[in-house]
Image (cartoon, coloured by chain):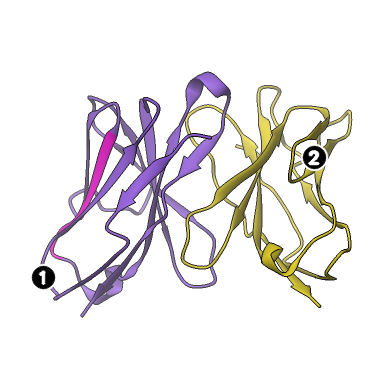
């Protein structure tokens, strides 16, 4: 199956710093990628939809200036958590849709962000 | 996007068949039904996808009745390593929204 690589897997940072998370589709082109966050023992919550070459579409309640998404190529999307604070600590997961094979989503391994 | 309803949790023993049913009453004509498995601190993993009737792959079967308002994921002969959260999604288009999922616990 298709492979989505997410990096880093874990990051610890001080409050006020920015953190960038990368999501790459390794063997297919992903015109659309999605970013989720997940709190312990909860389901995945969609944050935004990232389309190659255009602005991301954010879900209601997600601050676009806080969570910057860039999808500059068909294989790479990045999520930058700007001026991170402890409440931003969460598990962030990206996914990519392989449109030619139906509506399947393939997910990265996730990034555990801990803000001190 | 069709809202999905699943049991919050299920328990089973090794070697048994597990069936997890998902309700998606408002499924649209173009929606596919997809199941994912998630282990702690990992991204969800695709298990199986279907549109109608029955689909089978090397790890699971998916049963979808004619009205498509529900679906059942069948895991044959589960093992301890199948302990995970299983998500049913019914959707299409540009995004898929996750419901609460079913925590499956397999014991010896």
- Mark 2, residue position: B62
Where disc 2 sits, the SS reads: strand
Q: Quadrant of residue B65?
A: top right
Expressed as whole percent of the image width and height from the top left, the position of residue B97 reads: 54, 45
Q: Is residue B23 above or below residue A39?
A: above
| Label 1 Cα neighbours within 10 Å, binned few <14 / some 14-19 / many ≥20 | some
- Quadrant that contains the C terminus of chain A: bottom left
Residue B33 left/right relative to A71? right
The colour applied to the residues of chain B in this rendering is yellow
Chain at tag 1: A
Please tell me which residue is depicted at 66% across the width and 22% down the height of the picture: B30
- The foreground one among A116 and B107 is B107
Residue A29 left/right relative to B10? left
Q: Is residue A69 above or below residue B105?
A: above
Q: Is residue B15 above or below residue A28?
A: below
Expressed as whole percent of the image width and height from the top left, the position of residue A82 reads: 15, 58
Please tell me which residue is depicted at 80% across the width and 27% down the height of the picture: B52
Report the magenta stretch's main SS.
Answer: strand
Expressed as whole percent of the image width and height from the top left, the position of residue A18 reads: 13, 61
- The foreground one among B26 and A55 is A55
Q: Which chain is purple?
A: A
Residue bounds of the magenta highlight: A76-83
Q: Disc number at residue A53? A: none
Expressed as whole percent of the image width and height from the top left, the position of residue A89 reads: 31, 71
């Amino acid at each position: 199956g298709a492979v989505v690589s997410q990096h880093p897997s874990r990051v610890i940072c001080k409050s006020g710093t920015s953190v960038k998370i990368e999501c790459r589709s390794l063997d297919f082109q992903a015109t659309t990628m999605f970013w989720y966050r997940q709190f312990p023992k909860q389901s995945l919550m969609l944050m935004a939809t990232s389309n190659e070459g255009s602005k991301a579409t954010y879900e209601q309640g997600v601050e676009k200036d806080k969570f910057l998404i860039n999808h500059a190529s068909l294989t790479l999307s990045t999520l930058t958590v700007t001026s991170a604070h402890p409440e931003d600590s969460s598990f962030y997961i990206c996914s990519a849709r392989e449109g030619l094979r139906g509506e399947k989503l393939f997910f990265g391994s996730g990034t555990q962000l801990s803000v001190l | 996007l069709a809202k999905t309803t699943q049991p919050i949790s299920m328990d089973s023993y090794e070697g048994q068949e597990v069936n997890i049913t998902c309700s998606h009453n408002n499924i649209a004509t173009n929606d596919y039904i997809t199941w994912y498995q998630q282990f702690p601190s990992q991204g969800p993993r695709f298990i199986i996808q279907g549109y109608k009737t029955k689909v089978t792959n090397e790890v699971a079967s998916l049963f979808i009745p004619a009205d498509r308002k529900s679906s059942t994921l069948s895991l044959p002969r589960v093992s301890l390593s199948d302990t995970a959260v299983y998500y049913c999604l019914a959707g299409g288009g540009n995004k898929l929204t996750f419901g609460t999922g079913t925590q499956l616990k397999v014991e010896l």
